[in-house]
Image: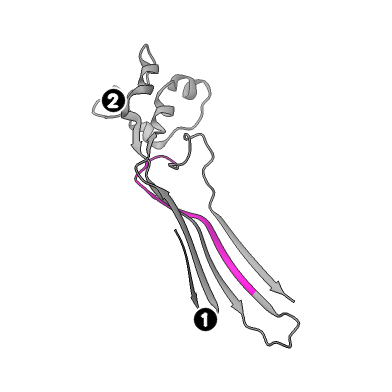
Amino acid sequence: FNNTFRYKDFDLSVEMYGSLGKKVNTDYIDSFVGTGTWIRHRGTNVQSFFKDRWSHTNQTSKLPSALGGTYVNQAVFSDFYMEDGSFIRCRDITIGYAVPFQKHTFVSALRLNLSVQNAFVLTKYRGLDPELRNFMSYPNPLSIVFGIKASF
C-alpha cells in the first residue's frame, strides 16, 4: 500500500506492506533445541521468554525444559513451535515541504524532507521480526533520514 497526501506546500507519503496467513517456525526452537550447546558452551543471548521455561521450580510452565536428552532433536518437528507470522510493516513515512521562492532568486526550487524507514510492525508474532529466519538474524533497522533537494 502506498499513499501520498498533499496540502499546500506539504506532502506526506506512507508505504506499507505485509503478509497474511504466514506460519513461522518460531524463535522458540533455537532457544530450546540444543540449548546445552548454545547457552552453556557459547553463552549466547536468548529470548526473554526463556526464563519462563519448565524447570523443577517452575513446573506449571507450558514452555519446554532446557534440558538436553534423547528426544531433543525430535522437538524440531513439533507444531508447538509454529506461530502466526502475519504482519503489516510500515516501510516508509516521508513528510516533505517545498520552500516557496521568487522566480528571480538564485535557487529555483528547494524541498526539505524527513523520512522514517521501518517505523513499525503490526503483528502477534512474539519473536524479533516475522521476516527473519531466526532470532540470531539482524533485524530490519529503524532509519531516520533528512533530505534536501535544490534546483538552480
Q: Is residue 10 above or below residue 78?
A: below
Assign the C terminus to one quadrant of the image: bottom right
Tag 1, which secondary structure? Answer: loop
Residue 23 location (% of width, % of height)? 36, 37
Image coloring type: one colour
For the residues marked 2 and 1, what is the alpha-carbon distance in whole angstroms? 64 Å
Marks 2, 1: nearer the viewer: 1
Q: Is residue 46 above or below residue 125?
A: above
Q: Nearer the viewer, residue 54 or 102?
A: 102
Q: Earlier in the sequence, mark 2 or mark 1?
A: 1
Crowding around mark 2 (Cα neighbors within 10 Å: few <14, some 14 to 19, many 20+) is few
Tag 2, which secondary structure? Answer: loop
As for residue 126 lying within the magenta part, the answer is: yes
The residue indicated by pointer 1 is: 8
Query: Mark number for residue 57?
Result: 2
Residue 67 location (% of width, % of height)? 37, 18
Residue 127 location (% of width, % of height)? 41, 39
Crowding around mark 1 (Cα neighbors within 10 Å: few <14, some 14 to 19, many 20+) is few
Residue 73, quarter of picture: top left
Q: Is residue 128 above or below residue 46?
A: below
The amino acid sitting under disc 1 is Lys
The amino acid sitting under disc 2 is Thr
User: From the viewer's perspective, is 89 left or right of 138?
Assistant: left
Assign the N terminus to one quadrant of the image: bottom left
Residue farthest to the left?
Answer: 60
Residue stretch rendered in magenta on the structure:
111-128
> Magenta-highlighted stretch: main secondary structure?
strand
Q: What residue do we see at 48% from left, 35% from top?
A: 133
As for residue 142 lying within the magenta part, the answer is: no
